[in-house]
Image (cartoon, rainbow, N blue to C red):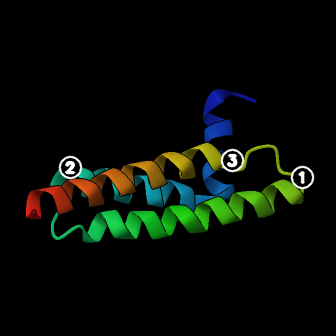
Amino acid sequence: MSRKEKDRELRQHNPMAYTGLLLSLVGMLFNPLALLSILGLVFSAVGLAASYRLESLGARTTGRGTAGVGIALGVIGVALFLWLIL
């Protein structure tokens, strides 16, 4: 299986993790009222929960790392927003 096929399989199994990562990254860069960072946190948390479910079903690619990075970036984005407000 090529790298491109593996990447497609990962996104097919856990799109919430990728969505959370993308929202967190965009929210951290543009930060309009921290809304995108908060949405990124929510989507990443759902993606993390889905990764545990996929692992219990025997999937090899779960997206746990992607969801973890999305959560970290979301927290950083919210923290930056709060720091700028204060």
Marks 2 and 3 sit apart, C-alpha to C-alpha, by 28 Å
Quick one: which residue is furthest to the front in this view? 86
Closer mark to the observer between disc 2 and disc 1:
2
Asked whether, in this view, residue 33 is left or right of residue 23, the answer is left
Instruction: Return the mark for residue 29.
Output: 2
Q: Position of residue 29 (x, y in %)?
A: 20, 49
| Front-most of residues 64 and 76 | 76
Whether residue 16 sits left or right of residue 70 in the image: it is right
Name the residue: 27% across, 56% down: 79
Q: Secondary structure at mark 1?
A: loop
Q: For mark 3, what is the residue? A: 9
**Mark 3 element type:** helix
Between residues 61 and 28, which one lies in front from this camera angle? 28
Distance, label 2 to label 1, CA atoms, is: 36 Å
- Residue 14 relative to residue 33: left or right: right
- For the residue marked with disc 1, what is the amino acid? Gly
Q: Residue at x 57, y 60 (%)?
A: 15
**Dot placed on the residue nearer the N-terminal end, 2 or 3:** 3
For the residues labelled 1 and 3, the Cα–Cα distance comes to 14 Å
What residue is shown at x 74% (from left), y 45% (from top)? Answer: 61
Which quarter of the figure is the N terminus placed in?
top right
Which three-letter amino acid code belongs to the residue tagged 3?
Glu
